[in-house]
Image (tube, rainbow, N blue to C red):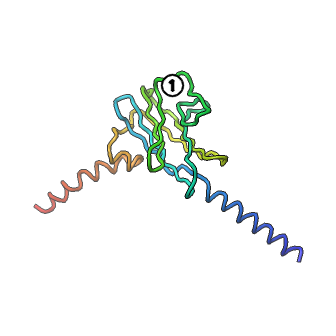
């Protein structure tokens, strides 16, 4: 009897924890591209539970705050003229970052809703590998070899018909 009661409590605790995790917000994808030679656009796609209040978003590099939609946080001074964060329909938080430095840079998207834990996702951007923004680079951010394949496929099919 004591063992069954202990097992029931463990099952109840596990169920409550799983439901808590299932209902929390999460970052689904980070997609990035260049909007100009030295400017980065990073889209942070996130998921929220149904009928939830609006989420807040911020982008960071380590402890430095690039920009945020949180009303109580202030942007790190060196980034005031370089970084801008905005929320878009479809649960997208977009960072526009001017003058991307040469080399690799880490960018972290942070999504927070109400009193729940913050959901984060980090991506490393290497300036020399950054693709220009287009529908393809946003849809397939990490498939740089896919774009040339898809664009040359019709040409290859035409050659085969001849």
Residue 47 spot, x, y in % from top left: 53, 53
Query: Is 143 rendered above or below residue 22?
Result: above
Residue 133 vs residue 105: left or right? left
Residue 117 vs residue 106: left or right? right
* Residue nearer the viewer, 64 or 20: 20
Query: Is 81 rendered above or below residue 142?
Result: above
Q: How many marks?
A: 1
Quadrant that contains the C terminus: bottom left
User: Which image quarter: residue 23?
Assistant: bottom right
User: Which image quarter: residue 37?
Assistant: top left
- Residue sticking out furthest to the top: 78
* Residue nearer the viewer, 57 or 5: 57
* Residue nearer the viewer, 151 or 51: 51
Residue 56 vs residue 1: left or right? left
Query: Is 135 rendered above or below residue 17?
Result: above
* Residue nearer the viewer, 71 or 40: 71
Q: What residue is rendered at 62% in x and 45% in y? A: 118
Q: Which residue is identified by label 1?
A: 79
- Residue sticking out furthest to the right: 2
Residue 99 spot, x, y in % from top left: 42, 26
Residue 50 vs residue 92: left or right? right
> Under tag 1, what secondary structure?
helix
User: Which image quarter: residue 14?
Assistant: bottom right
Quadrant that contains the N terminus: bottom right
Residue 121 spot, x, y in % from top left: 55, 44
């Amino acid at each position: 009897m004591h063992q069954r009661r202990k097992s029931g409590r463990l099952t109840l605790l596990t169920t409550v924890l799983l439901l808590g995790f299932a209902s929390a917000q999460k970052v689904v994808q980070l997609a990035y591209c260049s909007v100009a030679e030295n400017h980065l656009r990073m889209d942070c796609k996130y998921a929220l539970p149904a009928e939830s209040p609006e989420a807040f978003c911020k982008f960071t590099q380590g402890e430095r705050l690039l920009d945020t939609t949180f009303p109580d946080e202030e942007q790190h001074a060196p980034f005031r003229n370089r970084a801008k964060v905005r929320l878009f329909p479809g649960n997208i938080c977009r960072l526009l970052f001017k003058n991307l430095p040469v080399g690799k840079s880490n960018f972290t998207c942070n999504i927070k809703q109400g009193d729940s834990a913050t959901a984060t996702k980090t991506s490393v951007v290497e300036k020399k590998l950054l693709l220009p923004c287009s529908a393809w680079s946003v849809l397939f951010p990490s498939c740089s070899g896919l774009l040339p394949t898809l664009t040359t496929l019709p040409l290859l099919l035409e050659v085969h018909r001849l």
